Amino acid sequence: MPRQIDYYFSLQSPWAYIGHKSFRDVVGSHDLKVNHKPVVLVDLFSETGGLPLLKRHPVRQRYRMVELQRWRDRRGLQFKLEPANWPFNARLADGLVIAAIEAGHDPDRFLRRAFASVWEDELNLADPATLIGLADDCGLPGKALTERSAGEDIGKVYEQNRQDAMAADVFGSPAYVLDGEVFWGQDRIELLVDALKSGRAPYRSRA
C-alpha cells in the first residue's frame, strides 16, 4: 500500500505553483498517495501570526521578489513576477479542485494548467467562465464542477481543510505532511525526498 502525504496549497500561492511539478515528480518516483487539501490562505496566515503580502515590511517584500526570480531560474519556469490578475479570491478555484476530487477525478492535470494560467497567462481564476474553460480543456466537466464549487458543501470541506491544517501545524502554502511531519515550502522538497529515502521516523517538535 502506498504511503500517504497531505498536500496543503492554494492556487493563489506562487510557491505552490513553483513547486508543483517537482512535488509531483517525487510523488511518482516514490509511489505516494496524495491527499489534496486546498486551504484558504488569508485565515491561515492571520491565525498563525503571518501577514498578508502588502502588510509585510518593504524589506521582506523586496526579498520575496528576489526569491521568486531565483526559484524561477532554479525550476526552469517562465512566469510573470506580478501577473495582472493576482492576487485574486481563490475560493472558487480551490473549491473546483475539491469538487473534482469528490467526483472521482485526478486534479493534477487541472492544477498544472491552472497554476500556469495565473502566473504565465495572467488569467483571472476568480472568473467562473475562465475556470470552466480551463477545466474543460483538461477533460473535466467544467460547468458542473464550477457550479458545485460555489456551493455550501464544498465550502464546508474548504473550512475543514483549514482546521486540519491548523491541527497539523501547517501555516502556509505549499505544505507537505508526511507521517505527521510538516515540510513547509517548495524549497523543502529536497528534504522531503531525503526523509522518504532514509525511511527514518518523523521528526517531532519538543515543544
Image: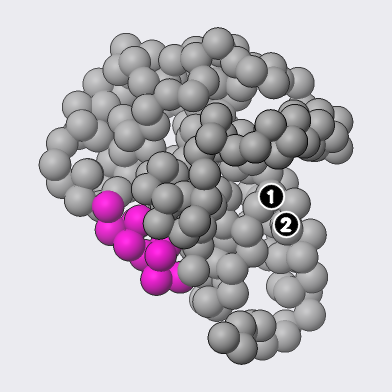
Q: Amino acid at mark 1?
A: Gln
Q: Splitting the image into 4 quarters, where does residue 77 fall? A: top right
Q: How many neighbours does mark 2 have within 10 angstroms: few (below 14), some (14-19), or many (20 or more)? A: some
Residue 163 visible:
yes
Q: Secondary structure at mark 2?
A: helix
Mark 2–mark 1 Cα distance, whole angstroms, equals: 6 Å
Q: Amino acid at mark 2?
A: Ile
Which residue lies at the image location 68% right of the left edge and 43% below the top edge?
Answer: 19
* Quarter of the image with the C terminus in it: bottom right
Which residue lies at the image location 55% right of the left edge and 30% below the top edge?
Answer: 54
Of residues 207 and 164, the one nearer the viewer is 207
Number of numbered discs overlaid on the protein picture: 2
Q: Splitting the image into 4 quarters, where does residue 140 fall? A: top left
- Decide: is 89 above or below 75: above
Is 13 covered by the magenta stretch? no
Residue that sits furthest to the left in the current view = 152
Query: Do residues under tags 2 and 1 come within 8 Å of each other at their CB atoms?
Result: yes
Of residues 41 and 32, the one nearer the viewer is 41
Q: To which residue does mark 1 refer?
A: 186
> Magenta region: which residues?
159-168
Q: Position of residue 62 (x, y in %)?
A: 75, 30
Q: To which residue does mark 2 refer?
A: 189
Residue 96 visible:
no
Q: Splitting the image into 4 quarters, where does residue 13 fall? A: top right
Which residue lies at the image location 77% right of the left edge and 65% below the top edge?
Answer: 191
Q: Position of residue 119 (x, y in %)?
A: 61, 21
Which residue lies at the image location 53% right of the left edge and 35% below the top edge?
Answer: 55
- How was the colour assigned to the protein in this rendering? one colour
